[in-house]
Amino acid sequence: MRPVILAALLLIFALPLEAAPLPPNVRAEVDALLSSLEKSGCEFNRNGSWYSGADAKQHILRKLEYLEGNRTVKSTEEFIDLAAATSSVSGKPYLVKCGGAAPIESKVWLNTRLTALRSAAGAPAATPK
């Protein structure tokens, strides 16, 4: 392969993915989910330590900010998968514990809230992945 073509290909693949803020409808759902977590009184487990809903919201917002700077997040489900379901450091799932109930994975907790949010708004439920 010619050196010029090889250099061009390397440059193309080295460029970051197109970054963009969340679409407005997705941003509204994300904000509603994070407000729900913050106000829920539930605890959020990240890498073995429990945090308040407010602390969890701030952590997830920082992850979202990073994602928005590096790639496009197209759906609320993608936001949950990429920013709110697992630790980027350990790969362990985040957990949510409400009162005396057993902890559940944050992905399940957030998807349940998303379904309720969409149902209340009259929006169709998303198709499961």
Image (spheres, rainbow, N blue to C red):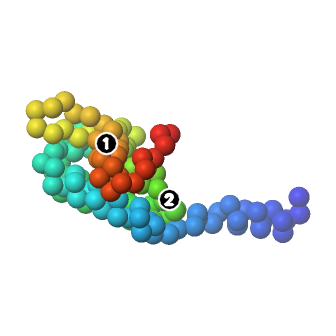
Amino acid residing under circle 2? Lys
Name the residue carrying label 1: 112
Q: Residue furthest top?
A: 102
**Residue ID for mark 2:** 74
Q: Residue at x 23, y 41 (%)?
A: 96
Question: Can residue 72 be spotted in the picture?
Answer: yes
Given the current orientation, which residue lies at the most extreme front position?
Answer: 122
Label 1 neighbour load within 10 Å: few <14, some 14-19, many 20+: few
Residue 59 appearing in the image: no
Which mark's residue is nearer the viewer, 1 or 2? 1
Location of residue 11 in the rendering, given as x and y in whole percent from the top left corner? 70, 67
Q: Quadrant of residue 7?
A: bottom right
Q: Position of residue 126 (x, y in %)?
A: 45, 47
Secondary structure type for disc 1: helix
- Of mark 1 and mark 2, the one earlier in the sequence is 2
Picture coordinates of residue 26 (x, y %)? 41, 61
Relative to the observer, which residue lies in front, 17 or 106? 106
8 on left or right of 116: right
In which quarter of the view is residue 6 placed?
A: bottom right
Say the numbered circle drawn on residue 23: none
Q: Nearer the viewer, residue 28 or 90?
A: 28
**Mark 1: amino acid:** Thr
Residue at (70% x, 65% y) in the render:
12
Q: Secondary structure at mark 2?
A: loop
Examine the rendered structure and indicate whether residue 69 appears above or below residue 73. Answer: below
Residue 39: name its quadrant: bottom left
Q: From the viewer's perspective, is residue 96 above or below residue 69? A: above
